[in-house]
């Protein structure tokens, strides 16, 4: 299909720039899979997706609250960059992507030993970054920041809506937490079908409109 050729030619740089270093390779593989026949499940038959958990791995772009007991200068809120790294006031650059909050606080505490007496560290994720790619028959394909709990209709709105060439029943979602493609109907989205609107998006998801 035409949109598959456009994906192959145009999206790697966009994906690298916006999601890049977080889910680039996985995203490109999923994009490639959109151009070949694959199994799918209708969203009405898909189990509800659980909300992100506090113990989920830390990702690039997430904001962490780091508290070092008795050390206000070493504590604060820090946003990780696209590499999953932030600059600690004493330790310099720290990469925490892929760790749980408990693992992150252990790593920071270990690095502070010898610099701070008996460092007690607490780490919590106060904001999770979420980026979703939207491609195919939409007005402005690209990678968009989303809020936790938002759905496919909101992703399509960020991409300027579907074009006149979009098929009503050929909206697919792929992602790192989905074992197969999930298929949706546009009519069900705009009609407010609870099951369709209740399918919320996750970081690294890819929405393709045929």
Image (tube, rainbow, N blue to C red):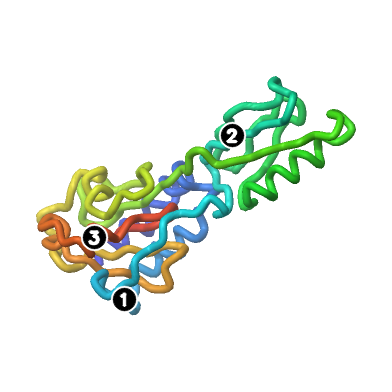
Left or right of 69? Residue 181 is left
Judged from the image, the secondary structure of the residue bearing numbered disc 3 is: strand
Q: CA distance from mark 2 to mark 1?
A: 39 Å
- Which disc, if any, is residue 65? 2
Mark 2 vs 3, N-terminal side: 2
Q: Which residue is mark 1?
A: 40
Residue at 55 percent across and 41 percent down: it is 125
Whether 103 is drawn above or below 31: the answer is: above
Judged from the image, the secondary structure of the residue bearing numbered disc 2 is: strand
Q: Looking at the image, which is closer to me, 99 or 106?
A: 106
Residue at 17 percent across and 58 percent down: it is 189
Q: Nearer the viewer, mark 2 or mark 3?
A: 2
**Where does the image place residue 36, in percent across and percent down from the top left?**
34, 74
The quadrant where residue 90 appears? top right
Where, quadrant-wise, is the C terminus in this rendering? bottom left
**Where does the image place residue 42, in percent across and percent down from the top left?**
25, 73
Whether 84 is drawn above or below 69: the answer is: below
Q: Which residue is mark 3?
A: 209
The quadrant where residue 202 appears? bottom left
Q: Residues within 10 Å of mark 2 (few under 14, many from 20)?
A: some
Left or right of 77? Residue 13 is left
Please, which residue is most extreme toward the top here? Answer: 73
Q: CA distance from mark 2 to mark 3?
A: 38 Å
Left or right of 97? Residue 210 is left
Q: Looking at the image, which is closer to me, 191 or 206?
A: 191
**Where does the image place residue 54, in percent across and percent down from the top left?**
53, 50
Residue at 42 percent across and 64 percent down: it is 30
Judged from the image, the secondary structure of the residue bearing numbered disc 1 is: strand
Q: Residues within 10 Å of mark 3 (few under 14, many from 20)?
A: many
């Amino acid at each position: 299909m035409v949109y598959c050729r456009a994906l192959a030619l145009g999206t790697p740089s966009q994906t690298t720039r916006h999601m890049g270093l977080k889910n680039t390779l996985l995203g490109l593989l999923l994009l490639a899979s959109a151009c070949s026949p694959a199994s799918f499940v209708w969203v009405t038959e898909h189990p509800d997706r659980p909300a992100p958990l506090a113990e989920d791995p830390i990702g690039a772009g997430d904001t962490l609250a780091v508290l070092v007991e008795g050390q206000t200068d070493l504590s604060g809120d820090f946003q990780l960059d696209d590499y999953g790294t932030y600059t600690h006031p004493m330790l310099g650059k720290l990469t925490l992507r892929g760790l749980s909050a408990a693992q992150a606080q252990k790593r920071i505490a270990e690095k502070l030993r010898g610099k701070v007496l008996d460092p007690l560290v607490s780490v919590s994720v106060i904001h999770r970054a979420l980026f979703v790619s939207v491609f195919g028959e939409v007005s402005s394909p690209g990678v968009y920041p989303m809020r936790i709990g938002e759905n496919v209709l909101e992703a399509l709105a960020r991409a300027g809506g579907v074009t006149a060439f979009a098929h009503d029943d050929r909206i697919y979602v792929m992602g790192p937490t989905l074992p197969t493609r999930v298929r949706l109907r546009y009519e069900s989205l705009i009609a407010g079908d609870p099951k369709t609107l209740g399918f919320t998006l996750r970081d690294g998801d890819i929405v393709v409109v045929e």
